[in-house]
Amino acid sequence: MRMVDLITKKRDGGKLSKEEVSFFVQGYTRGDIPDYQASAFLMTVYFNGMTEEETAWLTEEMANSGETFDLSSIAGKKVDKHSTGGVGDKITLITGPLVASIGIPVAKMSGRGLGHTGGTLDKLESFKGFSIDLSREQFMGLVNENKLAVAGQTGNLAPADKKLYALRDVTGTVNTIPLIASSIMSKKLASGAEAIVLDVKTGSGAFMKSLDESRQLAETMVKIGNNLGRQTVAVITDMNQPLGFEIGNSNEVKEAIQVLSGEKITDLREISVELATHMALLAGKFATYEEARAHLEACLDDGTALAAFRTFIGAQGGDTALVDNPELFPQADYHIEVKAPAAGFVHSIDAEGIGTAAMYLGAGRATKDDDIDHAVGITLMKKQGDAVQEGETIAVLHARDAEAADSRNKVLESYTINEEHIEKMTLIYDVIS
């Protein structure tokens, strides 16, 4: 078998066999196939796509290219949740303990954020002492004991994906559905979950900007999961404005604690409960959607979910005093108000722009080696559909710099204020199962 033949076959619209897909993934991971041939192959996929079977085979080979996790020693059906990413996305901090609070094991392996704000691991490290470096035995033991653990991804988890993504990033082949879907799902499969709920974001702050693209990605990932023996559901949710009111690491943790304490921050609570409901259904915990949702809502309102969160933080070495006293989290030196330039209604908030403003403050990483400042961030005082007066505060920057001019200007650019009233946006667009 020769790589040039696979490139030619795919260039001409042919369908690869499972053996040919395996030859490519294994050969490139080992270093037997050079970058120039792998780049040519990726470009043929970019233009000609892949069949459902080809995409499933690609995902499976990538998942099996390195270390895989066997979670069979954890009691119960393991359900994972994955988000395609967005601004203010602290949903995992809510769904994890919420689902764990009803006895469903959540064994979560996560990566660090590279972009606007930190990832789940960065947010959790706002808790002094919190450890993400768990041995396999520690990880399994914590899930068995508390139904929830979050650890950093091992460096050898789906190495083919890591190598291929780096190549896609420099060859203009990132934005194609089969390659995006196989990248996400290969890591989920390697992590060992039996069922997967996908939070597929759509809108200005999402990877997929249009609803049609988001639906296509969701459908592709659900087919991959189901074809490879994992029950998979995708929920398409809005990312045309940031989730909740807080952007930044410790600020987002504090807001997650508010939701876990029963506060009704509409978008965060609605999306978290929706995802948790589907996780509970896949785990076989309830017979109907209505029964599962009502039970999970009660767990938020009666303190059960917050108690599970407190236990989880303490079990991984975090300071649980911060759960009950969030004012103890690190604080920024300056709090700078951003004023509305005109009266009217907030028509839109460019989520990506707000995320960039947060990154300027130090809440995110421009490169993988950048340090995260857990204290800085942005609080949105007005969201889409809200009325504002000229000079009224629309956002507050939490900064180390008394001016923070770049962030302030970016926030102003991100808000669109018009005279006409506008309805609030849809939060959940579709469920693909």
Image (spheres, grey):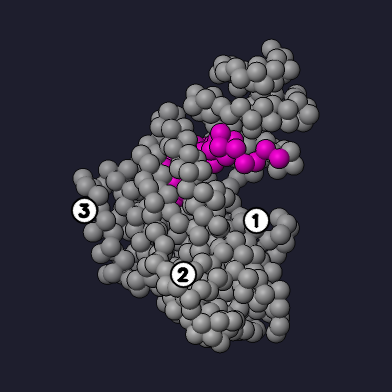
Instruction: Provide the secondary structure element on which disc 1 rests.
Output: loop
Res. 42 image quadrant? top right
For label 3, the residue is: 291
Which residue is labeled 2 in the image? 384
For mark 1, does the 10 Å Cα neighbourhood hold few (<14), some (14 to 19), or many (20 or more) residues?
Answer: some
| Quadrant placement of the C terminus | top left
Above or below residue 217? Residue 344 is below
Q: Position of residue 302 (x, y in %)?
A: 27, 70
Closer-to-camera residue (431/334): 431
What separation in Å lies between label 3 and label 2 (alpha carbons)?
A: 32 Å
The residue identified by callout 1 is 114
Residue at the image position 64 percent from the left and 32 percent from the top = 46
Residue 115 is left or right of residue 299, and the answer is: right
**Amino acid type, mark 1:** Leu
Give the residues in magenta: 172-200
The one nearer the camera, 205 or 33, is 205
Residue in the image at 39% along x and 51% along y: 429
Which mark, residue 231?
A: none
* Residue count near mark 2 (Cα–Cα under 10 Å), binned few <14, some 14–19, many ≥20: many
Residue at image location 44% in from the left, 46% down from the top: 198
Mark 3, Cα crowd under 10 Å, few <14 / some 14-19 / many 20+, is: few
Cα separation, mark 3 vs mark 1, equals: 38 Å
Q: Given contact means CB atoms under 8 Å apart, are the residues at marks 2 and 1 in contact?
A: no
Q: Residue at x 71, y 59 (%)?
A: 366
Mark 3 element type: helix
> At which x and y percent is residue 371?
70, 64
